[in-house]
Image (cartoon, rainbow, N blue to C red):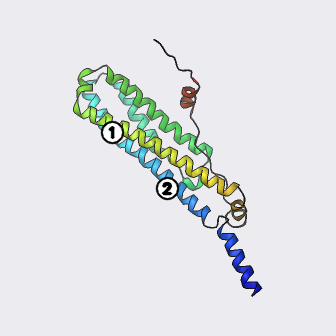
Amino acid sequence: MRRVTGLLIGLLFLMGCGVQSIPKSANQVEAAVAEVTNQYKRRADLIPNLVKTVKGYASHEKETLQAVIEARANATRVSIDPSNSTPAQIQKFQQAQGGLSQALGRLMVIAERYPELKADRNFRELQAQLEGTENRITIARQRHIEAIKQFNNLVMVPPSSWTNSLFYHHEKMAQWALDDAEQKAVEKTPEVEF
């Protein structure tokens, strides 16, 4: 009877200490990475149509259009492995995506110079889809950050960290960080003119 009682108490203790929570949390991180990657892919898929539309109006802006095409190619070559993500991998992924964001920003500045382009229905639709995708990327990154935080709490904070030490041996996952351009934007004091 004491053995059965001890076994039941031991099972109840393990159920509350991350035996199920740690693997579920790891799966959530993988799902969040997949969503981030999916949204970046969606953005990359929109770019050829956007470049094609702009090319029709601003064919002499070849340098900028080529930069967007090259940045897209770089961004699609870099991926993240959620089970082995390191700060270096995440930084490399962020740099590739940041390069694409900067190239797209330059493309949008060029579009401002061409009123006929801004009036083009295809361009407006593509621009709206791109803006929506950027919002989706932001939300997906926020969810990924939260999933990593939850996982790291489970593997680092007792009592679930004890279960991790005994059964899983997961390391703390690397978190997203700001790339250089994002860091400069955060540190920059906004200028207000009246």
- Residue 121 image point, x, y percent: 22, 32
Q: Mark 2 or mark 1: which comes first in sequence?
A: 2
| Amino acid type, callout 2 | Ala
Q: For the residues labelled 2 and 1, say whether their Cβ atoms are less than 8 Å apart.
A: no
Q: Quarter of the image containing the N terminus? A: bottom right
Residue labelled with disc 2:
31
Residue labelled with disc 1:
129
Q: Is mark 1 on a helix, strand or loop?
A: helix
Q: Which residue is drawn at 46% across and 39% down?
A: 74
Mark 2 closeness class: few <14, some 14–19, many ≥20 residues within 10 Å: some
Q: In which quarter of the image is residue 62?
A: top left
Image-based side of 15 in relation to 43, left or right: right
23, above or below 101, in the image: below
Q: Which of 119 and 106 is in front in this view?
A: 119
Q: Quadrant of residue 155?
A: bottom right
Q: Which residue is drawn at 53% across and 36% down?
A: 95
- Residue 13 image point, x, y percent: 70, 70
Distance from disc 2 to disc 1, alpha carbons, whole Å, reads 23 Å
Q: Residue at x 32, y 36 (%)?
A: 128
| Amino acid type, callout 1 | Gln
Image-based side of 158 in relation to 37, left or right: right
Image-based side of 73 in relation to 84, left or right: left
